[in-house]
Image (cartoon, rainbow, N blue to C red):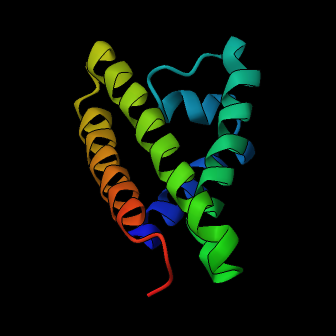
Amino acid sequence: MQGWLAMVFLAAGYAKLSATMTVLGGLLSWVRPEFEPFVRALGVAEICLGLSMVTPLLSWTIGHPVVRLGAVTMAGLAGAMSVLGAIKGDFGSFLLNIALVGLSVTVAVGRWRHTEPV
């Protein structure tokens, strides 16, 4: 699950950093040209969250708490974006973000249960 979360958040962050605002406006119903600094900052945050899912590959001791924090933060971000999707009437975005909340919570709970390397 961590791998899937990493891929989704890295891809979303990369898109928000590399695509033009016109393209992003066509993909995301909430994006407006005046939101560009926020959209770019959100892209950086999503890349950092995606990388947090793979930190155990570098160090189990350091990576394990980072995964927990990243998963909780992902759940919060995806929860906020699902609310935004519901408000905007974007059913696809709503469902995707609800799924991401479920995956993130599952990873967070699983990582909190196992605090030592298996």
Horizontally, residue 100 falls left or right of residue 25, namely: left
- Work out which residue is located at the far bottom of the displayed protein and give it: 118
Question: Is 63 drawn above or below residue 47 in the view shown?
Answer: below
Q: Position of residue 56 (x, y in %)?
A: 61, 76
In the rendered image, the vertical position of residue 36 relative to residue 45, given as above or below: above
Q: Residue at x 71, y 11 (%)?
A: 34
User: Which residue is outermost to the right?
Assistant: 37
Tell me where residue 43 appears, x and y as whole percent: 67, 41
Query: Picture coordinates of residue 114 (x, y %)?
Result: 40, 71
Q: Residue at x 47, y 69 (%)?
A: 115
Position in image of residue 37 (x %, y %):
77, 23
| Quadrant of the image occupied by residue 44 | top right
Q: Residue at x 53, y 64 (%)?
A: 6
Q: Residue at x 66, y 52 (%)?
A: 47
Quadrant, the N terminus:
bottom left
In the picture, measured across the screen, residue 39 lies left or right of residue 98, that is right
